[in-house]
Amino acid sequence: MGIYDELGVATLINACGTVTRLSGGMMAPEVTAAMREASEASVDMVALQAAACRVIRTATGAQAGIVTSGASAAVLLGAAACIAGLDPVRMNALPEVQDGRRDFIVVRSQRNMYDRALLVAGGRIVEVGIPDRVSGPGVRDAAAWEIAAAITKNTAGIYYLAEPRSKPSLRAVAEIAREHSLPVLVDAAGQLPPSCNLRRFLDDGADLVCFSGGKAIGGPQSSGILAGRSDLVASALLQMLDLDVFDSFFAPPDEFAVLRQMRGLPHHGIGRSCKVGKEEIAGLCVALTRFAAADPVARRAAWQNRLQLIATASGRSDMEITSGPIPILSLNAGSPEAAEALARQLLAGSPAIACGLGRLDDGLVTFNPVAMTDAQAEAAGARLRRD
């Protein structure tokens, strides 16, 4: 009997993708082995984050990096670093900011449910631009000069959502930020693959980049990466750590040497609830190394083949595999009502099959290959043949 049987929780076939509400994806044996081994000993967490920093630097080219408890935690910690820097007084005050320097400029068309992390850290969102291009009435979006015009003495940084259609370009935003000595915090939670994106946003001028560890990287679901400028990463780390220790006992390793210049340790930081365990750090390091080293062509081919297994087993002619960073299989149910009915039918079966719901209004049910095994893909196709 497995653990889910013991707990009375039914497993499902996750054809939706590595979404948190469906517990993400599945980890490679090397990743779970690293997590199990990590659980069997105690270590100094700063030393372990320093080791993770070396792994992240190799994969991303960043000055520094830490493992967080997810991409949202990375955004929160990154925002806290932009606001507080290396000042323990400011760290202690968060989420309050007495001098008002807590604004994050955000392009209106890039607003999303996850930017609340900026507010939790003590930030305030200042929107710029008009999203006609996204909402449909026109072609306009924000321009770089509008970001520049919004900068005041209260600006702590610029938040940028990394999406293929985001405007203006990150390079243009970073140029404005450099002119005003402001950091750019990039939310790239779901922007892997391609693996070249591990470096691209930093190369384009980002000061901090946030990635999810539990999506395509294949790490623990409760893991993420914050990579970028060494002083900001170190500030973020300090605001997450257990700091119930005398100052004289705190000895930052070389990876976070910038912390040695601080006048003292702050209290437990705004990101204390974002703590990440030794198991997640070890697992993420192994997963990131595997992801960065893997052949992207072979990875994509495996995903493509998995979707083909569904299509072949289903015997249906109303299915199409579409291209993109992750290939997606779409089933044309004929109408939004029929698509919703099919999605509900698949979810109500045994085992339940959770498919993508983002295209229901177009009459499409979608299947993402990343969180499935080949055997599950064949089982999903067989269910589609019957249903």
Image (cartoon, rainbow, N blue to C red):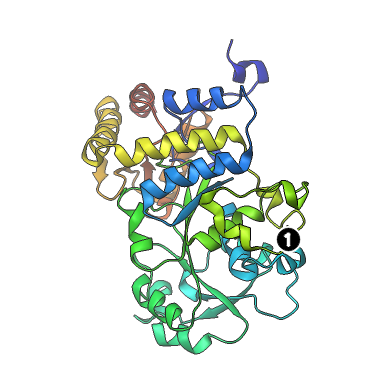
Q: Position of residue 171 (x, y in %)?
A: 34, 73
Left/right of residue 74 with respect to residue 164 in the rendered view:
right
Classify 27 as above or below 122: above
Q: Is residue 309 visible?
A: yes
Q: Position of residue 259 (x, y in %)?
A: 61, 58
At 29% from the left and 35% from the top, the residue drawn is: 303
Left/right of residue 86 with respect to residue 88 in the rendered view:
left
Question: For the residue marked with disc 1, what is the amino acid?
Answer: Gly
Classify 243 as above or below 127: above
Quadrant of image for the C terminus:
top left
At 46% from the left and 40% from the top, the residue drawn is: 18
Return the residue nearer the eye: 320 or 170: 170
Left/right of residue 203 with respect to residue 178 in the rendered view:
left
According to the image, label 1 marks what residue?
A: 264
- Circle 1 packing at 10 Å, graded few (<14), some (14-19), many (20+), is some
Return the residue nearer the eye: 68 or 27: 68
Return the residue nearer the eye: 104 or 333: 104
Residue extending farthest to the front is: 248
Quadrant of image for the N terminus:
top right
Q: Is label 1 in a helix, a strand or a loop?
A: loop
Q: Position of residue 82 (x, y in %)?
A: 58, 68
At 61% from the left and 67% from the top, the residue drawn is: 85
Q: Position of residue 356 (x, y in %)?
A: 43, 44
Left/right of residue 80 with respect to residue 322 in the rendered view:
right
